[in-house]
Image (spheres, rainbow, N blue to C red):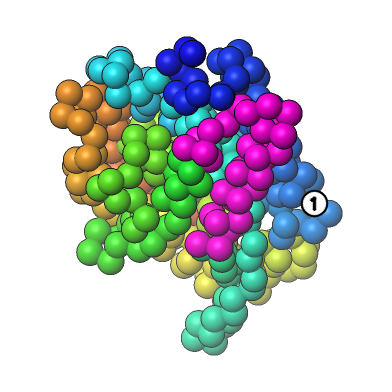
Amino acid sequence: MNRENLVEGVESSEDFNSNVERGISEALSLLRERYENQPDEKDNLPFHNVEHTQRVMRRVETILRAIQEADPGLVSDHDVEIGRLASAYHDTVQQWEENKIKDGEFTKVLRKRFAGKNETASSDEAVTFMAKTNENGVIFSDDDKATVQRAIDTTVPGWDMENKTVAQSNLKESSSLVERALALSDLGTAGMDGPEKFAKEGSSLFREENLDILDAIRSGDTIPKDKQEYFKTRMVGWLKSQADFVKGRQARLEAELQSIPAQARKSVAKLFSKFEESIKASKEVADEAEKMTFKELVRYMGY
């Protein structure tokens, strides 16, 4: 039995790889159908979509290949494919509700995602695909299914008040390398991909979360001056927070890499080389945003 099959009873690596690709294709199709092709603009997600998922998949493979190159005994090709499959499914369920918040004389409407429940439902979809595939002959082992489920669960977001950034409390010291790679990759844009992609993702996430601004702009109605100023204050505030977000991710990196074996840790750390560029660019963008007119800022944010 080929080492990449890991356990007795698992089919050939060719069958395994082709079924991973089929799973990835199905996951991306779900994202397109659910969050990119809906008649209601609110149901089309600017951030949690195919583009984000494909970037996460790429980063997961990059991290796992770096570990494999440092020590081939730590990560197999099979592990890399399981990481790619988990990445493809990690955001397939995005359930939410409107959250209305009184904000001075205005009421803002935010998208409240069901954090935790969404990740559990997404991992359930992945495991269901794997189990259904096994009906025609064992392709995915129980360990494969457990790894995918745990990996997706590590992406549940929380908030680190001290570092003003997102943290993932389900990422444990005992988490596998596949699980750790997905967690790092889901939040890895600023460190791995740099300022241009980070800025684009940040604006996309703002548009996704701030439903009242989307409604006002898409309605075509004239937005009163006081509301324009209110919206501008929120957009500028978001842009100002981005540098702190990146600083926080940078501050957390050492601890989040600590459980990677020493012989591979430096190789992964080197992949996160663009924090400083992203911090500098985020500050510059925030400074420029304050000088923009409302229309200029709306255009910059991607509306």
Q: Nearer the viewer, residue 283 or 273?
A: 273
- Report which quarter residue 163 is drawn in: bottom left
Q: Is residue 183 left or right of residue 273?
A: right
- Residue 59 image offset from top left, x and y in percent: 43, 30
* Residue ID at (67%, 33%): 134
* Bounds of the magenta segment: 116-145
Q: Nearer the viewer, residue 127 or 80?
A: 127
Q: Is residue 141 above or below residue 199?
A: above
Q: Is residue 144 left or right of residue 132?
A: left
- Residue 196 image offset from top left, x and y in percent: 44, 34
Q: What amino acid does circle 1 point to?
A: Gln
Residue labelled with disc 1: 38
Q: Is residue 172 above or below residue 96?
A: above
Residue 273 in view here: no
Q: Is residue 220 above or below residue 190?
A: below
Q: Nearer the viewer, residue 155 or 73?
A: 73
- Residue 20 image offset from top left, x and y in percent: 61, 26
